[in-house]
Image (spheres, helix red, strand yellow):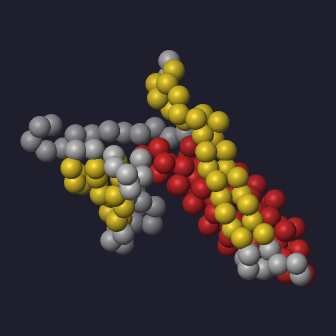
Amino acid sequence: MTDETLRSIEMSRLAKGRYVATNARGGQLVLGQGDESFSPVELLLVAIAGCSAIDVDYIVSKRAEPTRFDLRMSGDKIRDDQGNRMTNLTLTFDIAFPDDEGGQAAYDVLPRAVQQSHDRLCTVSRTVEVGAPITTRIEGREA
């Protein structure tokens, strides 16, 4: 790994079932159990939607500023012989542009932008679809 390719977070326990994740830039996000926290599965959905939203936004906004840019990411959490996992993952874009030449140009490029994000640009959804092994380690005295 190099500094150019490495992405990481640090996570610490706040209380039973509640954690704070901190990125290299100092941003923090509380996750786990609780009314206002995101669950890890919800964060997976956020990551997929957010990654594609950014890709598509940068492409279409060159043509026109959206008047609406909403996304919905959903899936079914199941348990089967492969363990707990998500299926039927669906990302829905609900985007509108002004009724002018720039808006029409943005509508024209929108399907391609969504497809490009899905097929090659979005690191998160590409990793989920292609798959990547996860190595686990234990550090510290208990190891």
At x 45%, y 66%, the residue is: 4
Q: Position of residue 110 (x, y in %)?
A: 80, 64
Q: State the residue at coordinates (42%, 52%).
A: 38
Q: Is residue 74 left or right of residue 63?
A: left
Image quarter hosting the C terminus? top left
Residue 140: image location, x then y, percent: 13, 44
Q: Position of residue 136 (x, y in %)?
A: 32, 39
Q: How many discs appear? A: 0
As drawn, is 1 to the left or to the right of 118? left
User: Is residue 122 visible in this depiction of the protein?
Assistant: no
Give left or right: position of 51 versus 25. right
Q: Image quarter for residue 97?
A: bottom right
- Image position of 70 with respect to 59: above or below: above
Residue found 62% across the figure and 50% down from its top: 73
Residue furthest to the left: 141
Q: Which of 127 and 114 lies nearest the eye of the viewer?
A: 114
Residue 72, visible in the rendered structure: yes
Quadrant containing the N terminus in the rendered view: bottom left
Toward which corner of the image does residue 16 lie, by quadrant? top left
Tell me the residue at 49%/24% (across/down). Answer: 79
